[in-house]
């Protein structure tokens, strides 16, 4: 804790809103989190908790109509990305910050060859000739271990399997050696065996390229495998932030604990799985007090009125947004 | 690609056969027979029988059918009853002006329609979107004969920019001036379709995941539209343009009559008026072949645009 390196990416009070019937509702509420150099930070939570919106807000990829970043800062290499022009943003996207998406089947352009799609990123940000860019694309396909890359360079996405397409996506994201990789559920749509391959590949490439990675997932098993630290999101807020070991050993927020109990494990039977009752509140119906209170078995009367802050749990580096948490964690 | 195009061409052969059979049956279903039409109601029974024998109408129907196929496939479509020229000669006489009109109309439709449709999709609910909707509504709701007459009144009679009647001058500039209004008349209708289809197709494509991927890659807005969205949004547009060729034939009849312009449409109108059944039958065959050729070209274009089409 003596020398504090500058974060690779620093979100401060990020607030993103969506418009529903002419009113704006926050989908990401004052999220503050730092991504350290070479770190993998996992963001977990159920569908609708604001994980993907957070990542899309960083690169400002949300639809122009119906979504806006209403406040906060996204600090990257001394710049606040929120205030950049669209043109300046284009020069960062795919260059120093890259992103890969959940759906490899629909995230590649069906009418462009795989080689052209990878080379495009290089041509945009690095310039040079098409030949050079294609040669680099070939090297990247080799790097992500696509079999017989030379012949596959001129093939179209529909000629690739799901796992191979996700590798192509990864190759595309790595093309310009980004400092930060945003991975939005990159393995969710894949078979379990392919999932494991892609995960270990991402881990290797992260080391090789010296990247920081923001890894979004709803799968805690994946978190355990890949993350250094974990941010648990609920209803657009971070409710708990800790190292992966601390989070699994000693979850402080009732929601984190519930997520862990809902996770299938090889060493326990499925009859012990406890699904979390209820569901994430709709954007337009987030409770005034603690957002999780309506589903929380530990709630007290004050929880329904007072909105809790994200504060230190007492353990260093472990933050939690719950004043009532039982001593010693909620197992 | 070449084998894909070849396969498509082979598929056109059965279509052509079905069309020819349909035309053969249709013509034989017309009440009265060709011999009495040719000779008129004053003809004697003997001369009718002689004419039927000359036309082969006394043969059994299957023999007539095979004879008909053989004639068509060897390019013999018979002789016009009114002019005495062969049908092929009649068609070749007007074909250049029909091709000029069709190409000009399609060019106008695409060159005006495609950009307007793209801009409307990009600026959804902006002024340009409303303009595009208005323009396409006007184009779709005016029948060709009404818009043709309006164009004549405004641009030929009031403003005098273009001739009222098509001149048969050989001066290329004069010919172009004659072509302008009829081509505009047909082209604006096509433009109306192209604007609508391009707008809705582009709106769909712009919401696709791969567009977001391209943005995440740093692709700039212009390149995003031209390189990533347009090609994927083009297939419905090609479909509309291909289908429009069929409509174009119907509308060209009206347009050629209004602007007194020689062409296949005017020829078929003349044949109808003169009850020239041989010419009519020949023209039906020519139109059917045109539509089949355009449809085949449309299919081949799909393959050029979208690599997935070739593998289906």
Image (cartoon, coloured by chain):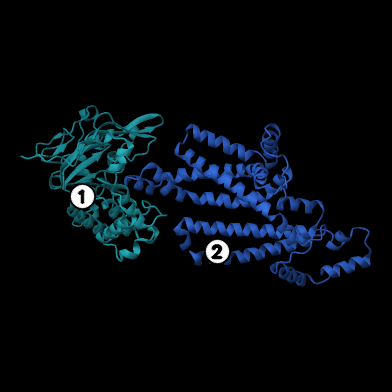
Pinpoint the chain carrying mark 1: A
SS type, badge 2: helix
Q: Is residue A26 visible?
A: yes
Q: Position of residue B31 (x, y in %)?
A: 82, 58
Q: x, y percentage for residue B253? A: 71, 48
Depth order, front residue of B94/B68: B94
Q: Which residue is mark 2?
A: B8
Q: Name, please, the residue furthest toward the front.
A: B171
Name above or below for residue B284 compared with residue A98: below
Q: Does dot 1 land on a helix, a strand or a loop?
A: helix
In the image, is residue B185 above or below residue B125? below
| Structural crowding at the residue carrying mark 1, measured as other residues with C-alpha within 10 Å and reported as few (<14), some (14–19) or many (≥20) | many
Residue B144 left/right relative to A124: right
The answer to whether the residues at label 2 and label 1 have Cβ atoms under 8 Å apart is: no
* Distance from Cα at disc 2 to Cα at disc 1: 52 Å
Give x and y (percent) for residue B141: 63, 38
Most distant residue in the left direction: A2
Dividing the picture into quarters, in which one does residue B287 lie? bottom right
User: What is the letter of the cyan chain?
Assistant: A
All told, the count of numbered labels is 2
Q: Is residue B229 above or below residue B60?
A: above
Can the viewer see residue A48? no
The answer for which chain carries disc 2 is B
Residue that label 1 marks: A223
Residue A54 occupies which quadrant of the picture?
top left
Residue under disc 2 on the same chain as residue under disc 1: no
- Callout 2 crowding tier (Cα within 10 Å): few <14, some 14–19, many ≥20: some
Chain blue in the figure, letter: B
Viewer-side residue, B80 vs A322: B80
Q: Position of residue A88 (x, y in %)?
A: 30, 38
């Amino acid at each position: 804790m003596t020398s504090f390196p500058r974060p690779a990416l620093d979100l401060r009070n990020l607030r993103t809103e969506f418009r529903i019937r002419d009113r704006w509702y926050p989908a990401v509420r004052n999220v503050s989190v730092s991504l350290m150099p070479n770190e993998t930070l996992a963001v977990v939570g159920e569908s609708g908790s604001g994980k993907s919106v957070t990542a899309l807000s960083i690169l400002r990829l949300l639809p122009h109509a119906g979504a806006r970043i209403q406040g906060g800062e996204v600090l990257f290499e001394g710049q606040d990305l929120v205030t950049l022009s669209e043109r300046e943003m284009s020069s960062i996207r795919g260059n120093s910050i890259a992103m890969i998406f959940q759906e490899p089947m629909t995230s590649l352009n069906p009418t462009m060859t795989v080689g052209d799609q990878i080379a495009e990123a290089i041509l945009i940000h690095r310039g040079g000739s098409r030949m050079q860019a294609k040669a680099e694309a070939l090297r990247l396909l080799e790097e992500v271990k696509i079999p017989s890359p030379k012949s596959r360079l001129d093939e179209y996405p529909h000629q690739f399997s799901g796992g191979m397409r996700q590798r192509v996506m990864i190759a595309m994201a790595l093309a310009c050696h980004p400092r930060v990789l945003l991975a939005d559920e990159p393995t969710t749509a894949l078979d379990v065996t392919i999932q494991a391959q892609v995960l270990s590949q991402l881990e290797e490439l992260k080391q090789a390229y010296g990247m920081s990675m923001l890894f979004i997932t709803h799968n805690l098993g994946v978190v355990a495998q890949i993350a250094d630290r974990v941010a648990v999101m609920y209803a657009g807020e971070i409710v708990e932030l800790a190292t992966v070991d601390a989070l699994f050993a000693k979850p402080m927020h009732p929601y984190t604990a519930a997520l862990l109990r809902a996770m299938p494990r090889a060493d326990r039977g499925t009859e012990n799985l406890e699904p979390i009752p209820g569901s994430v509140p709709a954007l337009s119906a987030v409770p005034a007090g603690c957002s999780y209170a309506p589903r929380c078995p530990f709630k007290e009367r004050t929880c329904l009125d007072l909105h809790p802050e994200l504060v230190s749990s007492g353990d260093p580096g472990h933050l939690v947004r719950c004043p009532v948490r039982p001593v010693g964690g909620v197992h | 690609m070449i084998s894909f195009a070849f396969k498509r061409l082979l598929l056109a052969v059965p279509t052509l056969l079905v069309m020819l059979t349909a035309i053969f049956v249709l013509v034989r279903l017309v009440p009265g027979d060709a011999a009495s039409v040719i000779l008129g109601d004053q003809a004697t029974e003997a001369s009718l029988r002689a004419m039927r024998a000359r036309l082969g109408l006394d043969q059994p129907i299957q023999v007539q059918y095979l004879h008909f196929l053989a004639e068509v496939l060897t390019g013999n479509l018979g002789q016009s009853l009114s002019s005495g020229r062969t049908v092929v000669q009649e068609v070749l006489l007007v074909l250049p002006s029909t091709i000029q009109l069709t190409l000009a109309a399609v060019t106008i439709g695409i060159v005006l329609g495609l950009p307007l449709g793209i801009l409307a999709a990009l600026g959804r609910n902006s002024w340009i979107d409303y303009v595009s909707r208005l323009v396409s509504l006007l184009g779709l709701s005016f029948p060709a004969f009404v818009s043709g007459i309006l164009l004549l009144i405004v641009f030929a009679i009031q403003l005098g920019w273009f001739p009222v009647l098509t001149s048969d001058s050989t001066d290329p500039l004069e010919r172009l001036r004659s072509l302008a209004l009829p081509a505009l008349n047909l082209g604006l209708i096509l433009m109306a379709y192209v604007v609508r289809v391009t707008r809705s197709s582009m709106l769909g494509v712009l919401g696709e995941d791969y567009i977001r991927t391209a943005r995440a890659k740093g692709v700039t807005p212009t390149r995003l539209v031209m390189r990533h969205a347009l090609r994927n949004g083009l297939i419905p547009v090609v479909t509309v343009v291909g289908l429009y060729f069929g409509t174009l034939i119907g509308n060209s009849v009206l347009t050629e009559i209004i602007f007194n312009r020689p062409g296949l449409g005017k020829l078929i109108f003349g044949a109808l008026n003169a009850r020239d059944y041989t010419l009519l039958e020949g023209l039906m065959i020519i139109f059917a072949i045109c539509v089949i050729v355009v449809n085949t070209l449309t299919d081949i274009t799909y393959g050029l645009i979208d690599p997935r089409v070739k593998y289906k």
